[in-house]
Amino acid sequence: MSVYLLMSVFVMALVTYLPRMLPLTFFKKEIHSVFIRSLLYYVPYAVLSALTFPSIIYATGHIPSAIIGGLVGIYFAYHNKGLVFVACATVLSSLIANILIPF
């Protein structure tokens, strides 16, 4: 193995480990602020939404069918359907919309 490859793996490991280790090292006290606790509670949902939404819109190459599929997915997820059911309903509705709605 080359030294360049070993150094790049080491740097990637360090960059991945630091954001996980630093908060645990510096923030040892329990967070009592209701605002900060609620903010930290909703951060994973906000990040997941920000990563998923553009993929939903541009996945099919046909924006109206992608929006219909996304809305169907949101509807069934809101009504506590299973993950497989939501995914299948989303794909099926997007496919049907893609066939029925002309470009």
Image (cartoon, rainbow, N blue to C red):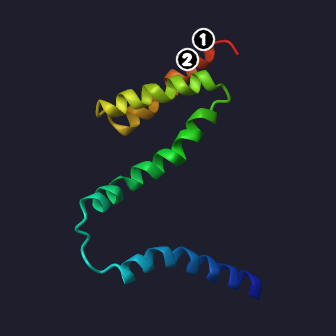
x, y percent for residue 21? 43, 79
Dot 1 amino acid type: Leu
Name the residue tied to disc 2: 96
Q: Nearer the viewer, residue 81 or 66?
A: 66
Q: Quadrant of residue 8?
A: bottom right
**Residue at image coords 24%, 59%:** 34
Q: Is residue 93 left or right of residue 102?
A: left
Residue at the spot 38% in from the left edge and 82% down from the top edge: 26
Residue 29 vs residue 71: left or right?
left
Check disc 1: other Cα within 10 Å, few if <14, some if 14-19, many if 20+.
Answer: few
Q: Residue at x 49, y 30 (%)?
A: 70
Q: Secondary structure at mark 2?
A: helix
Question: Helix, strand, or loop for circle 1?
Answer: helix
- Where does residue 16 sit, x and y in percent of width and height? 54, 74
Confirm or deny contact between disc 1 and disc 2 (CB under 8 A).
yes
Q: Which residue is mark 1?
A: 100
